[in-house]
Amino acid sequence: MTELLTQNILNHITLSKKELDNFCNLFNQKVVQKKHFLMREGEVCKFEGFVTKGLFRVYHIDSNGFEQVLYFAQENWWITDIDSFTNEQPSQLYIQALEDSEVLLISKKDKEFAYINIPKIEKLFRIMTQKTHIALQQRMIDNLSKTADQRYLDFIEKYPNLFQRLTNLQIAAYLGISHEFLSKIRRKIASK
Amino acid sequence: MTELLTQNILNHITLSKKELDNFCNLFNQKVVQKKHFLMREGEVCKFEGFVTKGLFRVYHIDSNGFEQVLYFAQENWWITDIDSFTNEQPSQLYIQALEDSEVLLISKKDKEFAYINIPKIEKLFRIMTQKTHIALQQRMIDNLSKTADQRYLDFIEKYPNLFQRLTNLQIAAYLGISHEFLSKIRRKIASK
DNA sequence: ATCATTTATTGAACTTGTTCAATGTTTTGA
DNA sequence: TCAAAACATTGAACAAGTTCAATAAATGAT
């Protein structure tokens, strides 16, 4: 059950079998049905999660009722609202399963326990946060400099797998455009 | 010279006087004149810096020659290209002083030395990276959901100090709009 | 103080992306 | 398997933001 997780961890740091077991034992599995929520706006995020099956979207609903996707998380991805989790304040985000999914959850208390008792876990999360930050920084630059057409093509190239599993509605919400406009972009690309 | 730095560190973690000294001694001061560069595109980022005086902009130039500002760093802010620094690959970014500035630099080797010899430094950078990630995440949501008008007003409210030190050209490059359009936004706001 | 450079403003024409409403297509669930 | 719901496409009118060119204002260097 924690095979994917251990593999993911060992990709970042080196841990003894014992440390690995101790850390993995802090996680609890949760099954989340398609369309069900792992978290909703207004709740304080009580977990950090590792997806072992399925696909989630982490999104925001703005004052006009439009949805913006912060990121998608499929198998082998970590998932949380880092702001709400870290600062223990109400989240602005929804986390919803887009497929029948399974996730391993660790609580804040257990994560802090791990920081203290397995020092390398500090390094693990330092490296992981760095990686997600680098990816977001790249996305920020792309959003500031590229047209929607180009961002769509980039998305397909960068996440061919997600592209196949997502509806155009979801992709549009990630790209920051209306799904109607995405439809027009698709037509334009197809006609070439 | 390292007063601001020690204060900044102690805001995040607790260190003994000795640990603090040892860590701070790994930094070297660099004076950077207005308009001069701390780093240019294509170079590998060899440092992580802490600004003690002045103001920098970290920006990208896209294929059409337009500049996008990833962030500004004034006194008490950290500055680096985390992607280039971490992965030791050529940067896509420029780092330029917008005022006569001073910065304390630590090399990758010395930072890694600190990770090993002062374990709490691992926590320091984990927390700092989390914070910058949270801020960037918020900016991403805002960029996806808000109009340029609103983003401009938000910027003024969030960074009143930067607002005063920056030209509209720089602010426009941060907001992701042309400076002409920013000018029109300003007129519209002023006329209310 | 003055000239050169950079920054800011403005208008007109244009491009990119949105909105709304209608229609067609696919998926889902009983 | 069939109806309902969700998703995708399209066009027309609109809004947001860009581009270009011209001018004005502020700043900097000497």
Image (cartoon, coloured by chain):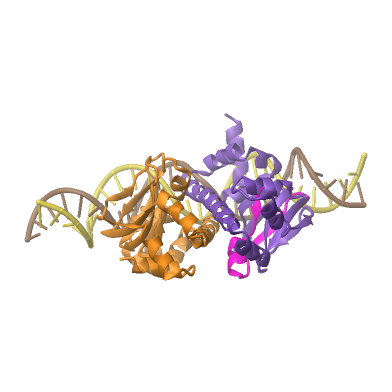
Chain colours: A orange, B purple, C yellow, D brown
Is residue B64 something one can see in this rendering? no
**Nearest to the observer: residue A155 or residue C24:** A155
Pinpoint residue A187: horizontal percent, then vertical percent: 37, 63
Measuring 56% from the left and 38% from the top, which residue is drawn there? B153
Q: On the rendered structure, is A139 left or right of B3? A: left
**Nearest to the observer: residue A14 or residue A129:** A14
Pinpoint residue C15: horizontal percent, then vertical percent: 51, 56
Query: Looking at the rendering, which quadrant does residue B116 occupy?
Result: bottom right
Q: Does the magenta stretch include residue B96?
A: yes
Above-or-below relation of A132 to A41:
below
Above-or-below relation of B179 to A135:
above
Above-or-below relation of B192 to B105:
above
Measuring 76% from the left and 49% from the top, which residue is drawn there? B99
Is residue A3 something one can see in this rendering? yes
Q: Does the magenta stretch include residue B172?
A: no
Q: Which quadrant: the C terminus of chain B?
A: top right
Pinpoint residue D18: horizontal percent, then vertical percent: 57, 53
Pinpoint residue B154: horizontal percent, then vertical percent: 55, 39
Query: Looking at the rendering, which quadrant does residue A97 occupy?
Result: bottom left
**Nearest to the observer: residue A32 or residue A59:** A32
Magenta residues, start to end? B76-100
